[in-house]
Amino acid sequence: MDLFAAGSETSAMVLTWTVLYLTVHQDKQEKLYNEIVKAVGTERRPQLADRQKYGSKCLKSLMINLPSLTPDLILTLACLTLKQ
């Protein structure tokens, strides 16, 4: 059970950082969105075979470069960033 929880926590952290990063960097968000729409379209759900280069690079970069912080600290940092 501990290994399952650890994997869930890691996935949650990556997704949290990704959303925060894309919120701050609108140009990156637009580029990623356009890549997804070009590959998948708007009529169906994405599949594993639809993986694209830019999206994979974004996730890998975030996993390598961003620290593993707790959700409470991430929320605090996000609030401080948005107030500026």
Image: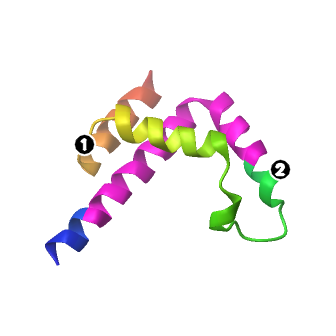
Q: Amino acid at mark 2?
A: Lys
Is 24 a magenta residue? yes
Quadrant for the C terminus in the image: top left
Give me the C-alpha separation between circle 1 and circle 2.
33 Å
Q: Looking at the image, which residue is at 54% across and 39% down?
A: 58
Residue 56 left/right relative to 12: right
10, above or below 20, in the image: below
Residue 80 left/right relative to 70: right
The secondary structure that dominates the magenta segment is: helix
Rendered image coloring scheme = rainbow
Quadrant for the N terminus in the image: bottom left
Disc 2, SS: helix
Disc 1, SS: loop
Q: Which residue is label 2 attached to?
A: 38
Q: Looking at the image, which residue is at 31% across and 41% down?
A: 74
What is the residue that sits farthest to the left in this orientation? 2
Q: Amino acid at mark 1?
A: Leu
Q: Looking at the image, which residue is at 83% across and 62% down?
A: 42
Q: Which residue range is magenta in the image?
A: 7-35
Counting residues from the start of the chain, the first of labels 1 and 2 encountered is 2
- What mark, if any, has residue 69 been given in the picture? 1
79, above or below 15, in the image: above
Please rate how many residues cluster around mark 2, counting C-alpha atoms within 10 Å: few if below 14, some from 14 to 19, many from 20.
Answer: few
Q: Looking at the image, which residue is at 58% across and 29% down?
A: 25
Is 19 a magenta residue? yes
52, above or below 64, in the image: below
Q: Quadrant of residue 55?
A: top right
Give coordinates of residue 17: x percent, y percent. 41, 43
Give coordinates of residue 45: x percent, y percent. 72, 70
